Each structure stands twice: as C-alpha cells, then as structure tokens.
Image: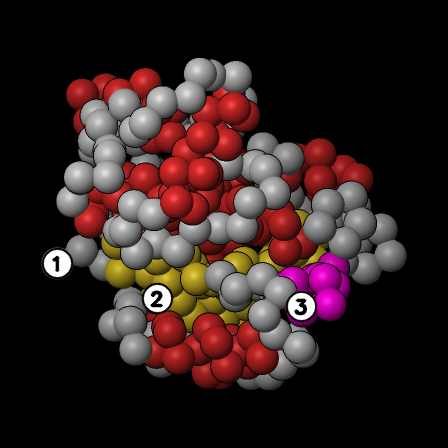
Amino acid sequence: MAKKVAISVGHSILKNGNCTSAGGCVNEYAYNKKLAPLIKKYLERAGWKADVIRCPEKKFAAKTEEKSYKLPLINKGTYDLAVELHLNASDGTGHGAEVYYKTETGKVYAQRVQKKLAGIFRDRGAKKDDHLYFLNGTKPPAILVESFFCDNKNDYKKGKDLEKVAKLIAEGIFGGKITKKEAAAEKPPYTAVKKSSGKEAIKWLQKKLNACYTGKLPDLSVDGIWGPKTMAMLRAYWKQLGWKKGSYAGKKTCTALFKNRKK
C-alpha cells in the first residue's frame, strides 16, 4: 500500500491582511505555498499519496487559529507522515538548513531530508524538539523543515530554484532517488473539460486553475460544479496566456494547466 503524507504550509494570512510568517529576501509563507505542490508532485511520482494542507487566507483573526485548523485535518487523515514547511530568519547572518523531529520515526525522516538539503545549504543538523505544536499535536510521525534563512541573500540565491529544493525534500522523505516518469505518462488526465464533464474532471480543472491563474480573482471552490466563477477564471486564465476565449477547456488548455503554465 502506498504511503500517505500531509504537507503543511507553515503560517497564513490573517483577516487584516498581515502575514504571520517571517520575511526578508523572500516571504516565508509565499515561498512555501509554492514549494508544497512541487514536493507533492515528486512524491506522487515516487508512488506516494500526498495532500497539501494550507490555512485559508484572510479567515483567521489570530495566528493561534492556524493549529486549530491544520491539526484536525492531519489527525483524521490516516497519514504515515506529516511535514510542515518553514524558512528560518535571524538578522541576515544566519544561514543553512535544519529539520526538527520528536519521535524516533520522525528522526529517520528528518535525518534523510537534512542530508539532502545539506547538499546545497549549510548543515545545521536534524534536531529533536519537544516544544513545537506541530510535532506535539500530530498523530502520525512529523517533521518540521526549515529549508534555509529567508533573510540571508546567499541562502535565498540557492533556494530560488524551487524545483531543486522540492526534489531534495521529496527524495529525503521517500528515501531514494526520484526519477522522471516516462514521457507517455506525462500527459494531462483530460483532453477536454466542459460543463457536461464529470465531477472529477471539473475538480481537476478547478484545482489547476487555482494553481496557475495569477490574477486577482479569489480561489475557486473545488466542488466539481461548473458555475459562473469557474467559467470566469477559465476566461481570465486564457487572457493571462494571451489566448482567445472559448466555451470550455480543450486539449491546449488542459495541457497548459497540466504543465502548470502561467505565462
């Protein structure tokens, strides 16, 4: 049976618009929001099941609400592992990667991920910690990854390659090399998605539009229902790519979404 992992994006954006994460050369939350789906992609390529868990934006009044949202989702999800993504920060001089764990099983994963990240960042080690709510509150073994220091220019220069960082973390979790799938498998699951399509196809379209559309429209509800908001975002995505509008997502659109095309 395939192993199942929850990938949690640390921090959130509160109702007042403030972000609860650190900043510097790059915003910690914004970076990991992009990193998490890439880790998921590589783990699924390795045969794992992976879910990205991210707090809804502009919903919480205080950052303490983040754990009340995330922990129940993880603890009822029958996961083999829970991973939370963070970036470190200090005064601009701190640098390197470190991974925290609490349990012995978590230690195994933490050491593997740390070893991978130490290939490009300073090795600050895998560290046991009994005071982090994510490690204390999750039923499955858990690790907390601090990939690098977001306020250090040299660290960020290395961390800009999201694909590389994601692959290193995924390979550490998996415990081996993750190779690219055969070209035949690198095809979108659908060649056309329209109002009359099944719910799963429409859900796929909604998820991909949420990931690839970069404009101001709010994220779609991934409910498998083709409504005016889904059509509006599809048209906005075509405009984003400089394409003519249509009435449904055809092969060209499905391929662009599958490849996470944003321009």
117 to the left or right of 251? right
User: Count the marks: how many?
Assistant: 3
Q: Which quadrant would residue 206 be assigned to in this image?
A: top left
Residue 16 versus residue 197: which sits nearer the camera? 197
Q: Which quadrant would residue 44 be assigned to in this image?
A: top left
Residue 239 versus residue 94: which sits nearer the camera? 239
Within 10 Å of the Cα at label 2, are there few (<14), some (14-19), or many (20+) other Cα atoms?
A: many
How far across and how far down the image is residue 37, in percent? 43, 46
Q: For the residues marked 3 and 1, what is the alpha-carbon distance in whole angstroms?
A: 38 Å
Disc on the earlier residue, 2 or 3 = 3
Given the image, on which type of amino acid does mark 1 rest? Met
Q: Is residue 34 magenta?
A: no
What's the residue at 49%, 61% (across, down)? Answer: 54
Residue annotated with mark 3: 14
Question: Is 239 located above or below residue 31 in the figure?
Answer: above
What's the residue at 63%, 39% (across, down)? Answer: 159
Residue 200, which numbered label? none
Question: Is 35 located above or below residue 14 in the figure?
Answer: above
What's the residue at 67%, 69% (across, down)? Answer: 15
Given the image, on which type of amino acid does mark 3 rest? Leu
What's the residue at 36%, 22% (across, down)? Answer: 246
Residue annotated with mark 2: 81
Residue 191 versus residue 5: which sits nearer the camera? 191
Specify start and end residues of the magenta stretch as a single range: 12-22
How far across and how far down the image is residue 117, in percent? 54, 46
In what quadrant of the picture does the N terminus appear? Answer: bottom left
Residue annotated with mark 1: 1
> Secondary structure under badge 1?
loop
